[in-house]
Amino acid sequence: WQFKASAPLNFNVHFHQGKEVAFPEKQDGVSELQGTLFAKSKEDYCWMWTNKGSGPSRLTLGVASENGK
């Protein structure tokens, strides 16, 4: 996965296990980031960006599966 934003954003990928929340990815104040997500448990993963700035931000996201599709 990779993303690019026109302004710094807070970003995370998380999942819920009962009342607990786990964050395999978490970074604040970034406008560009890339990585690989290894889903180690059978959960629904939430991808979240938060714009704490005063103006809008444009976000471009790219996601590829293990086989490149």
Image: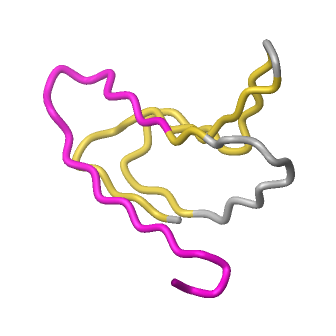
Above or below, 39 relative to 62: above
Magenta stretch bounds: 48-69
In x, y percent, where is residue 1? 53, 65
- In the orientation shown, which residue stands out farthest toward the top? 19
In x, y percent, where is residue 58? 20, 47
- The residue that appears at 75% across and 42% down in the rendered structure is 43
In x, y percent, where is residue 68? 57, 86
Is residue 43 shown left or right of residue 34? Answer: right
- Would residue 57 be counted in the magenta stretch? yes
Above or below, 17 relative to 1: above
- The residue that appears at 40% across and 59% down in the rendered structure is 3
Q: Nearer the viewer, residue 48 or 19?
A: 19
In x, y percent, where is residue 51? 32, 28
- The residue that appears at 53% across and 75% down in the rendered structure is 64
Count of residue discs: 0
- The residue that appears at 81% across and 18% down in the rendered structure is 18
Q: Looking at the magenta stretch, what is its main secondary structure?
A: loop
- In the orientation shown, which residue stands out farthest toward the right? 40
Residue 60: which quarter of the image?
A: bottom left
Above or below, 16 relative to 59: above
Q: Which of 27 and 22 is in front in this view?
A: 22
